[in-house]
Amino acid sequence: MFTNIIFFILALLIYHTRSLGPRLPVADLWVNAGTVLLFLTVFGMETWRRFHRLHLLALDKRQESYALQRGYQQVSQYLMILSLIFFASEIYLLNFKSLVALIPGTGRFSSLEGVIGITLYLIHVVLIWIFGYPAQEEIFRSSQARGPYLRSQLQFNLPVLFPWLIITLLSDLIGLVSSPQLRSFLNQPLGEMTYVLVFLMVLSIFFPFLIKTWWQCQPIPEGPKKKMLLAFCKEMDSPFQQIYLWPAFGGSLLTAGVMGLIRRFRYLLITPALLELLDPEELKGVVAHEIGHIRKRHLLFYLGFFVGYVLLAVFFSQWFSGRIFQYPALLNILHSWRKVSEDLSSVLMVLPMALGLILYFRFLFGFFMRNFERQADLFALKALGSPEPLVRSLEKIGFFSGQSRNLPSWHHFSIAQRVDTLKKAGRFPELVRRQDRKIYWSVGLFFLLLVGLSLYGIKERIWVSTGPAMNPQVLESLLKKELGSRPGDTKILMALAMLYQDGKRLAQARETYERILQIEPNHYLALNNLAWLLATSKEPGLFQPARALALARRAAALKPEAMILDTLAEAFLANGRPDIALQIARQVLARNPSNRAYYQAQEERFKQAMNKEKK
């Protein structure tokens, strides 16, 4: 499940950073739809081929279980990576969003659009489950039929998407009922981060109840083991609200877990197979391990770790967006690829974010998870006074699940490693204190890093910046230096003009835009930006609504994109025609622009101006 969290987040990142693009002809849409189906077919064939080869090796009975299980892990990981590559190709190369846009409601509700988009990725994952089932059944000695197995996979893994779905639905509701001021705040880095952090705090409290209900968990039935567990939990000052049976994969999975930050919504989950397999002392070892997670505040740290990812993602995206534009050569590349500039911009944004996500969760989070599991093991040893109950339970789980005791994962040490550590700590209690110190120092350094980055972000105004987080004087100096060797380069002039405009040096910006139009009269971006400047400026001599409208019309005729049409609407408003501005704003919203909240605020402005004029 933890691995799937990473892949689903990467899939959402790929999907949401791809803009809709221009409306495609009907013939192209049919071609794209057919090619998407072809891509799915090719992916399915490769998935079947990989797992079929592994299935034959398992049937051959020549390889030991460790090698087969390691091979299954590697094939699954390879195919999950391949699923992202195919999905990215379908989104970027085949413009799958243009097909999604044909479905009614997707333009107005980003949650509906997102559900349809992530469903395409989910189809890839389901193909992995379908074709991997025979090998999984043979290698891990699974007794569950294919149909129930697939339903169990969906039931087990879909909660990964619940937080994203809820936050997207809330965003749609906020966009519908909130004020333009609130939407403007939420579009800033500080607003986005505040919204996500508050959501995570609230969700972390109530999410366990939702998951417990979704997984159809039921209280443990009456019997000797329940009495023993309740008595043991009372002895340990039980931090759970209740103990539930967890029917994961038909109840055949051998595992247990605890979830919930606060006691009212904190549950201990034990699968029926595990409850039946272990004797009372072994069950005490498992429960003591789960209590260790709570006593050592691991669940609270996991929340802090996700909060830390939000903070780091916002920080580095702002920092990266500022640093990337310090290099004029990169500006030349972006402008020379004008036809695919939006896709290039998206790729430049996705790649570092995807790499950061993998490094953060796979390695940093993995380090803490493995060591938290070890700390919980040692807590159980200390609570029970002996390593034997937990050692026996781990060995039984490994044997009866068909899992090799030497097979580790990125978030768990292998059973062999855990058993060895427990036995050593039973002989040398100092190992328990050493593990505790290791955790305290690691967690302390991690949060110290977050605090340092937060303070640096405040100093550099990263949390409130809406543009490149860099020194404008440095960029101006770089651009002027580059312009000295290429004085007629409109790309460099354009970057310089936009820098002037962002810095409110409007006279210099106007002069530079005029210079660009002398060299290239049909430069649509210069026409657009100069029109905006002349339509919105409050400086004497710069407010020229009639010329702004003429320039905006020329820009819209050359490139009728959302941003250009928005300038045309602003020019009509400056000329006393809010009714036409409102019509244009609604046309823009009908195209499902990426920054929808901004264009909704513009629509509201034009509507208010028209109502004021009527009065």
Image (cartoon, rainbow, N blue to C red):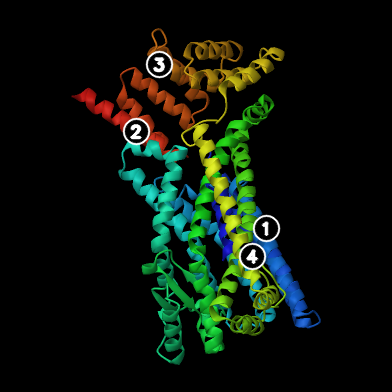
Label 1: which secondary element: helix
Q: Which residue is mark 3?
A: 537
Earlier-in-chain disc, 1 versus 3? 1
Q: Which of the two residues, 74 or 615, is positioned nearer the viewer here?
A: 74
Q: Which of the two residues, 551 or 29, is positioned nearer the viewer here?
A: 551
From the top left corner, tell me how far across and down residue 428 is, in percent.
Answer: 67, 74
What label does residue 434 carry, if any? Answer: 4
Mark 1 and mark 3: Cα distance apart in space = 51 Å
What label does residue 603 carry, if any? Answer: 2
Label 4: which secondary element: helix
Q: Which of the two residues, 345 or 468, is positioned nearer the viewer here?
A: 468
Label 2: which secondary element: helix
Q: Which residue is mark 1?
A: 82
Disc 3 residue type (three-letter)? Ser
- Can see residue 96? no
From the top left corner, tell me how far across and down residue 412 is, in percent.
Answer: 63, 68
User: Mark 2 or mark 4: which is in front?
Assistant: 4
Q: Residue at x 38, y 73 (%)?
A: 241
Earlier-in-chain disc, 2 versus 4? 4
